[in-house]
Image (spheres, rainbow, N blue to C red):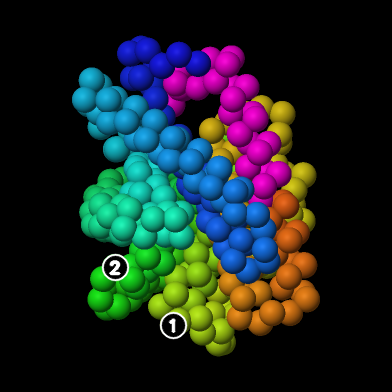
């Protein structure tokens, strides 16, 4: 797909989910290298790919902002796409985490950009929700993105800033996770089904408790207690539930929203690797291996379908509202 000025106007903010997915996989293999002796070169290759994608997608979106500010504004105030604006700051935070093993200075620099951006975008998005007359059908699991980003901040934040700052972001993320979870369950059970292209976003339900576990693990220096177990098992049960409902997810027609499968799977895989680090049991080891394979296959499949869609010029085109 050649990105000319016409397609640049329609460059979707949802493509930042690609960075989230690849960053998550890179972090998985960084942890797997330390904990279960996975080859280091896999992490290195994924980090390189992640960096190229991050620079390419971020640059393209900044050019869109420069040449087509009204198109960006339209996404910013869209009832569904507005939540994906926070995927920009989440991408900074995830690339920061991905770089932590390889280049801690680069990691902290990216964190210093991503953390305040995350706070600002969280405030903007929540203000948008409060000030606008939104309908129930506008709500969807992508609304978790501005929230989950806050829970990511402590992962590098415990090394980059005073602990109180990490606790601040952790508290915001967990509190609004509970609030939004209640809204989403009400919307899904008592109202119309999600649109077909939004069905993959159900996997985002895995992310808040899984990332919460990882963040709490970092804040408490590796504590495994009742609260961390609560977060981990909520994430694990949510994964089981979604796998139990796998027939609901149609793989015949590709949408960018398929990338919603990737980061949540990576998050629960990382959480399981940390459980193995703390407990060292056979169950956590086998669980880690299974989830690494599953996450790798899903990221690979979604990448393949994305490349196909790019070649068919099905991305960066005008969308029906």
Q: Is residue 281 magenta?
A: no
Q: Which residue is drawn at 59% across and 25% down?
A: 307
Residue 196 seen in the current view: no
Return the residue at label 2: 160
Residues 180 and 172: in front is 172
Q: Is residue 257 among what the camera can see?
A: yes
Q: How far apart are marks 1 and 2 (CA)?
A: 15 Å
Q: Nearer the viewer, residue 196 or 132?
A: 196
> Mark 2 or mark 1, which is nearer the start of the sequence?
2
Q: Which residue is drawn at 41% across and 50% down?
A: 95
Are there few (<14), some (14-19), or many (20+) residues within 10 Å of tag 1? few
Camera-side residue: 24 or 254?
A: 24
Determine the image quadrant of residue 51.
Answer: top left
**Tags 1 and 2 touching, CB below 8 Å:** no
Looking at the rendered structure, the secondary structure element under dot 1 is: loop
Q: Tag on residue 220?
A: 1
Residue span colored magenta: 295-321
1 or 2: mark nearer the eye: 2
Q: How crowded is mark 2: few (under 14 residues within 10 Å), some or many (20 or more)?
A: some
From the viewer's perspective, is residue 113 above or below residue 255?
below
Image point (78%, 76%), residue name: 282
Can you tell which quarter of the image residue 133 is in? top left
Q: Image point 26% across, 71% down: which residue?
A: 161
Q: Circle 2 sits in a helix, a strand or a loop, which is it?
A: helix
Q: Is residue 162 left or right of residue 234?
A: left
The reply to whether the magenta stretch includes residue 313 is yes
* Horizontal and vertical percent position of residue 196: 61, 35
Image quadrant occupied by the C terminus: top left
Seen in the picture, residue 170 relative to 126 is either above or below; the reply is below
The image quadrant that residue 112 belongs to is bottom left
């Amino acid at each position: 797909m050649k990105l000319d000025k016409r397609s640049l106007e329609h460059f979707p903010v949802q493509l930042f989910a690609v960075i989230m997915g690849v960053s998550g996989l890179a972090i998985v293999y960084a942890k797997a290298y330390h904990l279960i002796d996975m080859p280091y070169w896999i992490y290195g290759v994924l980090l390189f790919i992640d960096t190229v994608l991050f620079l390419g997608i971020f640059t393209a979106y900044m050019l869109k902002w420069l040449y087509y500010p009204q198109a960006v504004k339209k996404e910013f105030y869209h009832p569904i796409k507005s939540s994906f604006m926070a995927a920009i700051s989440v991408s900074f935070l995830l690339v920061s985490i991905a770089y932590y093993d390889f280049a801690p200075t680069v990691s902290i620099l990216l964190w210093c950009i991503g953390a305040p951006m995350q706070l600002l975008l969280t405030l903007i998005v929540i203000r948008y929700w409060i000030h606008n007359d939104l309908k129930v059908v506008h709500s969807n699991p992508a609304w978790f993105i501005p929230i989950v980003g806050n829970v990511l901040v402590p992962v590098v934040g415990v090394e980059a800033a005073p602990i109180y700052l990490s606790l601040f972001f952790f508290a915001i993320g967990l509190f609004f996770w509970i609030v939004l979870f209640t809204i989403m369950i009400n919307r899904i059970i008592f109202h119309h089904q999600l649109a077909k292209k939004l069905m993959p976003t159900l996997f985002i339900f895995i992310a808040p408790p899984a990332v919460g576990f990882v963040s709490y693990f970092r804040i408490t220096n590796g504590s495994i207690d009742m609260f961390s177990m609560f977060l981990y098992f909520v994430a694990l049960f949510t994964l089981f539930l979604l796998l139990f409902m796998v027939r609901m997810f149609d793989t015949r027609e590709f949408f960018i929203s398929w990338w919603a499968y990737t980061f949540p799977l990576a998050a629960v895989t990382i959480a399981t690797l940390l459980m193995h680090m703390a407990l060292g049991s056979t169950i956590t080891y086998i669980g880690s291996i299974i989830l690494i394979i599953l996450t790798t296959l899903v990221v690979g499949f979604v990448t393949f379908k994305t490349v196909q869609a790019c070649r068919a010029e099905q991305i960066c085109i005008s969308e029906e509202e």
